[in-house]
Image (cartoon, rainbow, N blue to C red):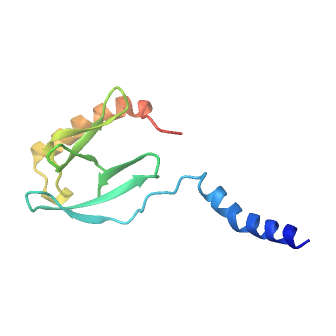
Amino acid sequence: MKRLFILLTAAMLFFPLMIGSSHAVPANPRPMEITQPNGEKLTIRLRGDERHHWYITEDGVLISLNKKDYYCYAYINKKGETVAGRKIAHNENERTKCEKRYIARLQKKTEKNRHKVQTNR
């Protein structure tokens, strides 16, 4: 009887851990201020869960780290991968007209390929 009690107690303690690991946890929605390598500040948000996540600017523009560790405006390619563009990301109130047009072009690319996003589910 004592052995059964210990077994049931152990099962009750570990059961929630097994269930919790089978579900994805949402990303922290709070904005974070980061510093780009050139010293500029950028406010970003993390979206998604631990299996599939991405970064956006505070106003919702997709961004990704490039090879030089700058957050750049990004798009989703034909394979469903997020690709960093060539322009460094800025907060909305610091963008030039040229930058805004560039973002619009990247967003059109992304919309065409959004359905191809690869997830590990």
Query: Which residue occupies the foreground of this view, 91 or 72?
Result: 72
x, y (%) of residue 114?
Answer: 39, 34
Give above or below for 113 relative to 31: above
Residue 73: percent from left, percent from top: 22, 44
Q: Quadrant of residue 118?
A: top left
Indicate the position of residue 64 as horizontal and vertical percent values. 26, 46
The residue lying at 59 percent from left, 52 percent from top is 23
Instruction: Looking at this view, name the residue that lies furthest to the right.
Output: 1
- As drawn, the residue found furthest toward the front would be 3
Observer-nearest residue: 100 or 37?
Answer: 37
Q: Is residue 30 left or right of residue 22?
A: left
Total count of labels:
0
Q: Quadrant of the N terminus?
A: bottom right
Q: Quadrant of residue 86?
A: top left
Q: Quadrant of the C terminus?
A: top right
Q: Residue at x 11, y 61 (%)?
A: 40
**Residue 73 in the figure: left or right of residue 114:** left
Q: Residue furthest top?
A: 78
Q: Residue furthest left?
A: 38
Relative to the observer, which residue lies in front, 90 or 79? 79
Query: Which residue is pictured at 31% across the width and 52% down the height?
Result: 56
Image coordinates for residue 63, horizontal then vertical, percent: 26, 47
Residue located 7% across and 57% down the image: 38
Look at the picture and state if 98 lies above or below 26.
above
